[in-house]
């Protein structure tokens, strides 16, 4: 039996959501949420639950079903990953936004923190890179340390037309052709829509291996699709356990009672906080392994909730700005502001009960009181104490904070975490009456970029750009 | 003649501050700043200039003089760095917050983006690590890839008592002793206060090499002191050019007329924006090399401005929350929110006119309009077009934004950038009538951590923690 099929292990690995410090019982009536405020929302919550369930049944939120519908896909991914792990020195993912943030977050969470620097035998697979920008220095730097002859590239774009990713693809395809000739076709794996966009056309014509992102799965909800599963499997991560964790959280989130449903409650609390003017949401994991979960969440939260119009077409300019922090590091950077600055934020800690390493602090300097108290403890205890102390300081300062508790960091708990945050996001969007799944606000910039690059058909926009309000030289110092 | 002694080169390398898109001339009267609003503040600005100049003359802001007062220190640093570069395989900085963020930012800006993966001869110096957390997995991971026998450690703490850094120090000192015996003393370089704290005592007793942080230089203003200069020099960065850049910006910032002073103007604009309810400040460089500048700035801005009390003891709960972003990457993560969400932020782009690499996008797929327009251009042009397009989209959506323009990324422009942001921070603090140089809000958490670690003398706090409001189990799902 795989461990994720064992119910008692699952229960032991269940992640918990502690929202005590959001409530007026803890931080007082002026700054906390009263339980009655939640109860008063129950009709609205029921309505949101119905809408979300309806969408799921209508097949509009297929990301919710990814833990169940991919048995064959998983098999193909494992086969492809196995081949990549055997044959190549380096794996490079080309993608941006939703195609990159999930793979980076899961790799950081579940692989060694200096993965690429380990000897091959300790890694078991190729070195792992995600190139999610078009900075020429970054692209040059990659090829200073990577031998293209031993590299496989995973090109990931849902639309099949993302400019940044397709530009990277054109560069890499050319380099591969020059280096190894027609065999370059074996070195490109395309993850994209099965029908739409340029990438799938190219992949079919040139015979690349392909994986598909289901139609009802938007970029930022795609980590549990082949977008995330292939790179994870290449890195040796147990993707079946990841999906099992997500399925377990789906079970926990199928509870209609908001007081028993972690994702719904998380969303309701943020909804009330937003009504009270909290326009900032900080995610602060106390583990380097979870550092990039905050980046992944930042996209999910920002793009899903940052909306000018609600579903009735009313101008609402909704959105809470996500902020990434890392404990204990950012106690020395951000906590001063969080405890003393404006009452404008909700802080979500992520804590880990059992780290995968244990390091002892040796005793020394018994006469120096500023140092000696550290000796004889583990550093595990120190980071735990610091998290508790920071939580306490925020509580004393009456700052809304909440904690997601991971018993351990493993594929099962990471699957839960991803899924919980996705459901929280979709649910708060229902409460806010906005569409979590579109991103109309990026069109203007996209079109302006086409115009500036001289893409045919965008001549009018180019003229608009050139005839726009001219900048004043006096405002450039 | 060194290039930074050539006036025409300096002028060519001068960084510029473009604030057009903050102004009502560009984004309209409702959301922009009118020039008259700035003029109306001139008496207040003069007063702030006087106060800042007075502090400098009184020796209270010695960080402003770091470009001038370190001739001998620089000589010592270069000698130490030269030895480290010759003798060791690995350099590890142990520090947190102000002791780590600057060294990380400058290393990322001025060294190769995959520095540690380059062969030794291309690096010219040791591999470079900054360990700025106490996560046991991270510490374990470091020693999985680093041979302690060939490593030198730079322990950096201004107070000499920072728990996280001293815990790291105790661990490393013990490991070194076990590995190489009494010679461990040669492997630790302490950067700390010359008088106060445990570290200087230990360093003197055990004979470590030491560098000092001048008394009037707080952690977050210390990058141009030995805190930043030693690691930079170990990485082969021209620290004299860095300091020359800072000195040049000091010159540019000595202009009393706010319309000619980039740092003062930057501060005044943020001050007005804050009055108008913009409680978020996004820094979005369009270069991977500048990614961690946003982290460094996030500490500077958050700790300096996040204050409960003003200088008259009035409760003000001041502060603007810094947000780190990266162009073009975060166009696919945050721009949706920035263009369509609440009017609650100021976005500061950092752009680079000339990158250190040039990469061409080959022509291909002439029949696919979604891809073919990319071919034949450089990727340099693409990232530039994307920045301009994003700026345009924000301007169209009437969102306050401004741009710091770097002609190139080099030690001279980075020195300017650091110094400009420091002066902006100090200046806005004067306008806000708050103390930029303390951090009273971190005390509560620090003391609670001591109590939880069982440090003698903190028994009462421990009792308080234990007798505090108990968490309700019903609020943990």
Image (cartoon, coloured by chain):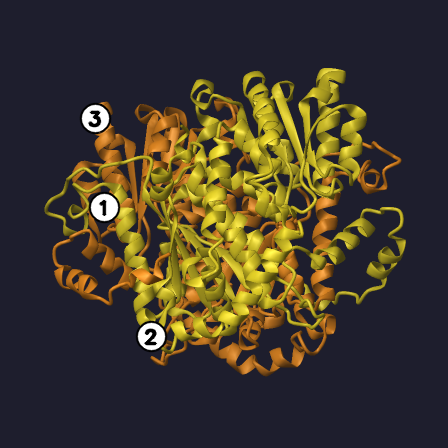
Chain colours: A orange, B yellow
Residue A414 seen by the camera: yes
Residue at image mark 1? A199
| Chain holding disc 3 | A
- Give B334 or B356, whichever is nearer the viewer: B356
Residue A8 relative to residue B293: left or right:
right
Counting from the top left corner in percent of width and height, residue B120 is at 47, 19
Structural crowding at the residue carrying mark 2, measured as other residues with C-alpha within 10 Å and reported as few (<14), some (14–19) or many (≥20):
some
Q: Are marks 2 and 3 on the same chain?
A: no
| Chain holding disc 1 | A
Residue drawn at 62 percent across, 60 percent down: A337
- Give B63 or B136, whichever is nearer the viewer: B63
Counting from the top left corner in percent of width and height, residue A190 is at 29, 42
Residue drawn at 61 percent across, 33 percent down: B93
**Where the N terminus of chain B falls, by quadrant?**
top left
Counting from the top left corner in percent of width and height, residue A412 is at 56, 47
Residue drawn at 73 percent across, 73 percent down: A25
| Chain holding disc 2 | B
> Is residue B254 shown above or below A410?
below
**Residue furthest out toward the left:** B367
> Is residue B456 shown above or below A209?
below
Q: Which is nearer the N-term, disc 1 or disc 3?
A: 3
| Quarter residue B354 falls in | top left
Residue at image mark 3? A178
- Give B235 or B82, whichever is nearer the viewer: B82
For the residue labelled by badge 2, is the local secondary structure a helix, a strand or a loop?
loop
Residue depth check, mark 2 versus mark 3: number of the one nearer the observer: 2
For the residue labelled by badge 3, is the local secondary structure a helix, a strand or a loop?
helix
Counting from the top left corner in percent of width and height, residue B91 is at 58, 27
Q: Are marks 2 and 1 on the same chain?
A: no
């Amino acid at each position: 039996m795989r461990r994720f099929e064992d119910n008692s292990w699952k229960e032991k690995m269940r992640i918990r959501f502690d929202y005590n410090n959001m409530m007026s019982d803890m931080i007082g009536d002026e700054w906390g949420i009263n339980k009655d405020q939640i109860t008063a929302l129950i009709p609205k919550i029921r309505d949101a639950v119905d809408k979300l369930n309806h969408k799921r049944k209508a097949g509009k939120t297929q990301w919710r079903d990814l833990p169940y519908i991919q048995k064959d896909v998983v098999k193909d991914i494992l086969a492809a990953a196995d081949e990549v792990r055997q044959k190549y020195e380096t794996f490079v993912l080309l993608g941006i936004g939703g195609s990159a943030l999930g793979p980076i977050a899961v790799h950081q969470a579940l692989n060694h923190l200096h993965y690429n620097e380990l000897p091959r035998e300790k890694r078991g697979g190729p070195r792992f890179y995600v190139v999610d920008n078009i900075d020429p220095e970054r692209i040059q730097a990659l090829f200073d340390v990577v031998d293209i002859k031993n590299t496989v590239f995973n090109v990931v774009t849902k639309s099949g037309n993302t400019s940044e990713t397709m530009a990277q693809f054109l560069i890499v395809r050319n380099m591969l052709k020059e280096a190894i000739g027609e065999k370059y076709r074996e070195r490109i794996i395309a993850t994209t829509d099965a029908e739409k966009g340029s990438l799938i056309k190219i992949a079919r014509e040139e015979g690349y291996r392909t994986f598909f992102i289901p139609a009802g799965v938007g970029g930022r909800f795609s980590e549990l699709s082949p977008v995330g599963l292939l790179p994870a499997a290449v890195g040796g991560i147990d993707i079946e356990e990841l999906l099992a964790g997500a399925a377990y959280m789906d079970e926990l989130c199928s509870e209609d009672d908001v007081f028993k449903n972690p994702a719904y409650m998380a969303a309701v609390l943020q909804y009330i906080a937003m009504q009270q003017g909290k326009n900032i949401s900080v995610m602060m994991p106390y583990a380097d392994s979870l550092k990039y979960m905050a980046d992944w969440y930042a996209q999910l939260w920002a793009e899903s909730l940052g909306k000018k119009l609600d579903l009735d077409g009313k101008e609402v300019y909704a959105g809470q700005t996500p902020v990434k922090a890392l404990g204990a590091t950012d106690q020395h950077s951000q906590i001063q502001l969080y405890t003393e600055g404006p009452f404008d934020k909700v802080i979500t800690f992520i804590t880990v009960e059992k780290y995968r390493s244990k390091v002892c602090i040796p005793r020394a300097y018994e006469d120096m009181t500023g140092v000696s108290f550290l000796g004889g403890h583990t550093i595990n205890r120190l980071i735990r104490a610091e998290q508790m102390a920071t939580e306490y300081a925020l509580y004393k300062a009456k700052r809304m904070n909440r904690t997601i508790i991971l018993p351990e960091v493993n594929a099962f708990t990471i699957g839960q975490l991803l899924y919980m945050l996705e459901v929280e996001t979709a649910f708060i969007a229902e409460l806010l009456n906005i569409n979590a799944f579109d991103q109309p606000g990026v069109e203007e910039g996209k079109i302006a970029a086409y115009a500036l690059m001289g893409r045919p058909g965008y001549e009018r926009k180019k003229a608009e750009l050139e005839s726009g309000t001219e900048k004043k030289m006096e405002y450039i110092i």
